[in-house]
């Protein structure tokens, strides 16, 4: 059974919405994120709660906003605990600008290498680069990054097929990009766990 597909399909029902009650959303940049979204873990319907939001910037330019979600009943007290938590969790990246596929792939390689130097996860990063090449991102697009125990990592540009990489360690490495010992910045790390 492919648990990842159901998990992602349900996730897409709770996308970064634009016409939701103000008290059930958090605004970051030009995007409003739901504070709770529906999900699926195996055959079980679950809820995922927003743990926080942040903005990824480069040279003072806004690149994408990020929302972090984790299974509602999960107890995660620190950023590192969220990164390593073996529970359903998701990151939603919504782009404030168009980013070239090659640049996006390079940034992921460099960010993962902060905690896992090359050639760690070369096959997974190559697959992710291929996915970005096949599905370029434009301003306003959202990408969901999903992790579920024993289902590995999923990446899905909204409106495109998902990429499934059945490697739980790679999923954790992606979360460590934002929440690990070496990460993309203190503001992102604290922002993504500001509501835990």
Image (cartoon, grey):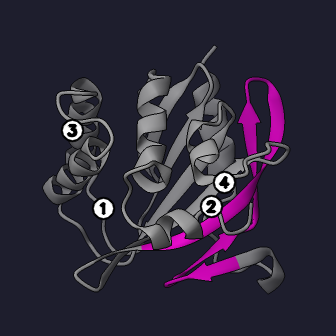
9 or 65: which is nearer to us?
65
Q: Taking the image as drawn, is residue 133 in sight?
A: yes
Residue 12, image x, y percentages: 62, 51
- Which region of the structure is painted magenta? 26-55
Mark positioned earlier in the residue sequence (2 or 1): 2
In this rendering, is residue 87 above or below 51? Answer: above
- The answer for how far apart the CA atoms under marks 2 and 3 are is 24 Å
In this rendering, is residue 37 above or below 65? Answer: above
The quadrant the C terminus occupies is bottom right
Using residue 2 as the reference point, say whether residue 173 is left or right of it.
left
Which residue bears the numbered disc 3?
130
Q: Which mark is residue 137?
A: 1
Q: Quick one: which residue is furthest to the left in this view?
A: 102
- Answer whether residue 45 is magenta in the image: yes
Residue at image location 64% in from the left, 13% down from the top: 1
Using residue 108 as the reference point, say whether residue 42 is left or right of it.
right
As helix, strand or loop, the secondary structure at mark 1 comes to loop
Mark positioned earlier in the residue sequence (3 or 1): 3
- The answer for how far apart the CA atoms under marks 4 and 3 are is 26 Å
Mark positioned earlier in the residue sequence (4 or 3): 4
**Comparing labels 4 and 2, the label whose residue is closer to the camera:** 4
- The answer for how far apart the CA atoms under marks 2 and 1 are is 16 Å
């Amino acid at each position: 059974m492919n648990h990842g597909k159901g998990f992602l399909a349900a996730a897409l029902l709770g996308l970064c919405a634009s016409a939701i009650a103000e008290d059930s959303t958090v605004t970051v940049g030009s995007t409003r994120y739901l504070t709770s979204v529906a999900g699926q873990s195996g055959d079980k319907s679950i809820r995922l709660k927003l743990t926080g939001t942040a903005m990824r910037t480069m040279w003072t330019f806004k690149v994408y906003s990020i929302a972090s979600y984790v299974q509602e009943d999960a107890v995660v007290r620190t950023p590192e605990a969220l990164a390593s938590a073996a529970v359903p969790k998701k990151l939603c990246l919504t782009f404030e600008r168009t980013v070239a596929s090659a640049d996006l792939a390079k940034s992921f390689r460099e960010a993962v290498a902060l905690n896992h130097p090359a050639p760690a996860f070369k096959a997974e990063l190559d697959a992710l680069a291929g996915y970005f090449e096949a599905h370029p991102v434009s301003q306003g697009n959202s990408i969901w990054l999903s992790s579920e125990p024993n289902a590995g990592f999923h990446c899905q540009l909204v409106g495109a097929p998902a990429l499934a990489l059945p490697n739980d360690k790679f999923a954790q490495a992606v979360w460590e990009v934002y929440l690990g010992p070496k990460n993309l910045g203190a503001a992102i790390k604290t922002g993504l766990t500001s509501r835990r």
